[in-house]
Image (tube, grey):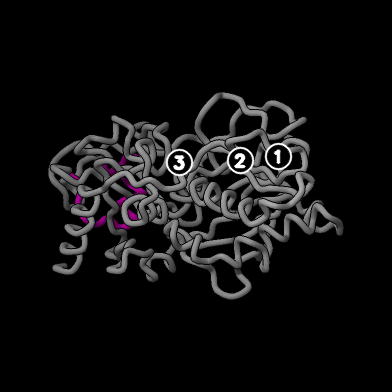
């Protein structure tokens, strides 16, 4: 118990001392991508990382002719619509993993080439959705640090009760008396989908009437979350990247929130990386880039380009230091670049 308290206090202190570093932040492409370029949308969780990968990848081929495909990743937030690349259809901006997968399915490669996804295949996806793994993340819950009523730890059963609205006061789960205010990210969020499944076991939790949906995932800057009774899911990799990795921005930072334990296991270890036992639990998840299986499996220049970015020997998997610098854990061996479908 003493170790948990010390670790939690240290995390509180780190969050309080958070400064906004000048780092490659997630953002829309600075130029309109060419028709041949590889362009993606979707997950908030992996957007800052893909923005960095895009910059690095494009820098590595800076001298190549314009006909050489570059890599671009659109932010989940911004204008209501986007034209992803030259000659593309104008589409609603996808905000979240499922929104990105839907955009991939509803358009051709003339508009979008991949979707960022912090969830795996699920009912409703198509057999042409090929999920290409690249890193390990985890999801825990967060709450206000200073003056907050939440305890340091909740069990899976308690989280389930909170989000089904059968547990409604912090005093009944080891906290200070106060009516619990559960929040979830926006619909279409992969973090939302994964968290509800993790706390529900085999059957995802259906949120009760006391749950408020809508705050953008992986940021504590929404005013409603600055509440002593609020609880909100949070990607552990995103938190580590923001607090310890220097990748926060005015819009993307934990604000008053800090991460909490589940079933007595801390999500972050003393080295400020994802705690291995937590990553190995039901709260650990693989994150993906989703491409069209038909394109991936059809020999030719387009398939070669996709595999050269996302495949086991592609740019992403051969640059694990970028993966870890954004808070994720690198996947072992050939797991990076491995594929799965529904």
Circles 3 and 1: CB atoms closer than 8 Å: no
SS state under label 1: loop
Question: Is 274 included in the stretch rendered in magenta?
Answer: no
Counting from the top left corner in percent of width and height, residue 98 is at 59, 41
Q: Earlier in the sequence, mark 3 or mark 1?
A: 1
Viewer-nearest residue: 160 or 139: 139
Which residue is label 2 attached to?
A: 41
In this image, 229 relative to 74: left or right? left
What range of the chain is rendered magenta? 149-167
What is the C-alpha distance between the residues marked 3 and 2?
27 Å
Counting from the top left corner in percent of width and height, residue 180 is at 24, 39
Q: Quadrant of residue 91?
A: top right
Residue at image coords 44%, 68%: 280
Q: Earlier in the sequence, mark 1 or mark 2?
A: 2
Give the vertical position of 253 relative to 62 (above or below).
above
What is the C-alpha distance between the residues marked 1 and 2?
8 Å
Q: Is residue 316 visible?
A: yes
């Amino acid at each position: 118990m003493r170790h948990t308290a010390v670790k939690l206090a240290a995390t509180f202190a780190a969050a309080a001392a958070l400064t906004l570093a000048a780092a490659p932040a997630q953002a829309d492409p600075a130029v309109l991508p060419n028709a041949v370029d590889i362009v993606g949308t979707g997950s908030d969780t992996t957007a800052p990382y893909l923005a960095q990968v895009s910059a690095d990848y494009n820098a590595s081929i800076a001298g190549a002719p314009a006909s050489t495909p570059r890599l671009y990743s659109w932010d989940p937030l911004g204008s209501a619509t986007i034209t992803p690349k030259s000659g593309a259809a104008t589409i609603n901006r996808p905000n979240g993993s499922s929104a990105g997968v839907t955009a991939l399915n509803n358009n051709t490669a003339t508009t979008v080439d991949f979707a960022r996804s912090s969830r795996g295949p699920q009912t409703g996806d198509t057999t042409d959705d090929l999920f290409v793994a690249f890193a390990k993340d985890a999801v825990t819950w967060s709450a206000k640090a200073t003056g907050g009523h939440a305890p340091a730890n909740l069990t899976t059963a308690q989280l389930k009760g909170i989000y089904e609205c059968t547990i409604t006061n912090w005093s009944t789960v080891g906290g200070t008396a106060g009516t619990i205010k559960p929040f979830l990210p926006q619909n279409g969020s992969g973090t939302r989908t994964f968290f509800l499944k993790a706390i529900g076991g085999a059957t995802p939790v259906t949120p009760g009437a006391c749950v408020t949906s809508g705050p953008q995932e992986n940021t504590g800057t929404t005013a409603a979350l600055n509440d002593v009774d609020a609880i909100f899911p949070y990607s552990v990799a995103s938190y580590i990247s923001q607090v310890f990795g220097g990748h926060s921005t005015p819009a993307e930072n934990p604000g008053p929130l800090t991460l909490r334990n589940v079933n007595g296991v801390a999500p972050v270890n003393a080295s400020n990386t994802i705690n291995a036992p937590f990553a190995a639990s039901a709260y650990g998840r693989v994150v993906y880039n989703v491409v069209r299986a038909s394109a991936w499996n059809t020999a030719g220049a387009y398939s070669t380009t996709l595999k050269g970015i996302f495949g086991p020997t592609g740019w992403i998997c051969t640059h694990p230091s970028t993966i870890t610098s954004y808070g994720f854990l690198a996947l072992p061996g050939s797991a990076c670049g491995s594929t799965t479908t529904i």
